[in-house]
Amino acid sequence: MTRPKLADALRNAELIHGREVLDAAIATMGGRIAEALDGEVPVYLSVMHGGLIFAGALALAIPCDLEFDYVHATRYRGNTQGSQLHWIRQPQVEMTGRTVLLADDILDEGYTLRAVRDYCRQRGARRVLIAVLCEKRHGRTAPGIAADFVGVEVPDRYVFGFGMDYHEQGRNLPGIYAL
């Protein structure tokens, strides 16, 4: 099967949020997160792969100490739709009695984020805060999941860039594009 070309997608895509907008949103989120942490050192979990670029930028914008780890769970496995959650890597850091801050690229339907949040709670996390670069507002979000910190909103379209992929391509684009 031939993978669609990123260059073709970019010719038909609309830039929704450029780098300047994303940088400003991330800086604002970093300050709000620091206030919410109030001196606490949280477990900072990047949700791979999509959350990698955002999580790195956000970590630099949070002016307090963080203990890093990551989680890799996916429903998509390179596709645009998925169902069953597949755990590729579970966090190794101790969570009992601690605050966990999850950093992910997008809150769309939220099934993966909800599963990761619930896993952290089962591991004894005192509270789990969720920070996402972008959120789709569409009414299909899984019951019981919401982000505590949101950078930008995106339309209910296929979005990619700044961590989000177009058929496993384009995660390193400096903006968010929509088809």
Image (cartoon, rainbow, N blue to C red):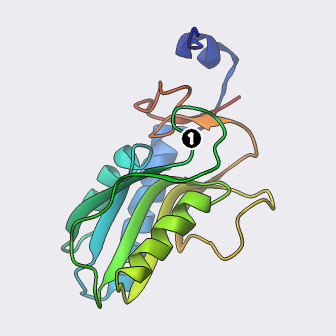
Q: Is residue 19 left or right of residue 8?
A: left
The number of numbered badges drawn on the structure is: 1
Q: Position of residue 110 (x, y in %)?
A: 62, 60
The residue at 70%/17% (across/down) is 12
Comparing 23 with 42, the one in front is 42
Q: Which residue is mark 1?
A: 76
Q: Position of residue 103 (x, y in %)?
A: 41, 61
The residue at 45%/76% (across/down) is 129
Comparing 29 with 85, the one in front is 85
Say above or below: 144 vs 27: below
* Disc 1 packing (10 Å; few <14; some 14–19; many ≥20): some
Quadrant where the C terminus sits is top right
Secondary structure type for disc 1 = loop
Identified by mark 1, the residue type is Tyr
Q: Position of residue 92 (x, y in %)?
A: 22, 66
Q: Is residue 74 left or right of residue 49?
A: right
Say above or below: 95 vs 158: below
Q: Position of residue 14 (x, y in %)?
A: 68, 28
Q: Is residue 102 left or right of residue 158?
A: left
Say above or below: 16 vs 37: above
Comparing 61 with 99, the one in front is 99
